[in-house]
Every structure is written in structure tokens, then in C-alpha cells.
Image (cartoon, rainbow, N blue to C red):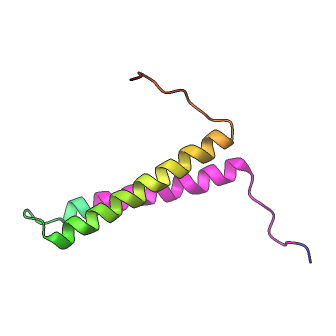
Amino acid sequence: MTDLIPPENDGETVRRIAAAHTAASRDVEAFLRRIPEVPTPADITEYAALLAREEALRTERTDAAEAAGLGVPTIGGA
């Protein structure tokens, strides 16, 4: 049986992952808009999870962009 859904090309993959990263960033922003003045332990846990998701998607986006030929050299340096 042949696949009916064609595989994504590199550009489509980068766009899809970039959209997911944007959504994760918006989730962080929404959280920060509703966080109480004194965060609870649950708030801190939720924030950590949101940041981890955003960072994972950022890394995935960067890797996909590099695979698509959009590698950017690091600016600055250590």
C-alpha cells in the first residue's frame, strides 16, 4: 500500500515547528498575564513545564531550520 499523505519537505517542517514554538511562547505569555502576585508551588511547576516545552520546540525548530539549509552561525562567542 502506498502512502496517501506525501512526506513534508524541509520548509513545511520548519514552518510547522515554528508555529508550534509560537504557540508555546503564547502559552508562556498567557500564563504570565494571569499569574498571581505571589505564585504558588503549582504556579511555579506549571511555569517550569511551559518553559521546558517552549525550549524543546525552539531547539527542534533550530534543528529543522539547519536541516533545511537555514543554519546561522553563532553571533558573539564565548
- Dominant secondary structure of the magenta stretch? helix
Identify the residue at horizontal 44%, vertical 60% (top origin).
23
Location of residue 26 in the rendering, given as x and y in whole percent from the top left corner: 37, 58
Identify the residue at horizontal 34%, vertical 57% (top origin).
51
Query: Which of these two is toward me, 48 or 15?
Result: 48
Task: Please tell me whether residue 26 belongs to the stretch shown in magenta.
Answer: yes
Residue 71 location, quadrant: top right
Indicate the quadrant containing the N terminus: top left, top right, bottom left or bottom right. bottom right
Identify the residue at horizontal 41%, vertical 21% (top origin).
76
When the figure is inspected, residue 36 is found, relative to residue 1, above or below; the finding is above
Query: For this view, does 58 lie left or right of residue 71?
Result: left
| Furthest residue toward right | 1
Location of residue 70 in the rendering, given as x and y in whole percent from the top left corner: 63, 35
Task: Please tell me whether residue 65 belongs to the stretch shown in magenta.
Answer: no
Location of residue 8 in the rendering, given as x and y in whole percent from the top left corner: 74, 57
Location of residue 63 in the rendering, given as x and y in whole percent from the top left corner: 59, 45
| Furthest residue toward bottom | 1
Residue 3 location, quadrant: bottom right
Identify the residue at horizontal 29%, vertical 61% (top origin).
48
Residue 45 location, quadrant: bottom left
| Furthest residue toward front | 78
Query: Which span of residues is magenta-colored?
Result: 3-30
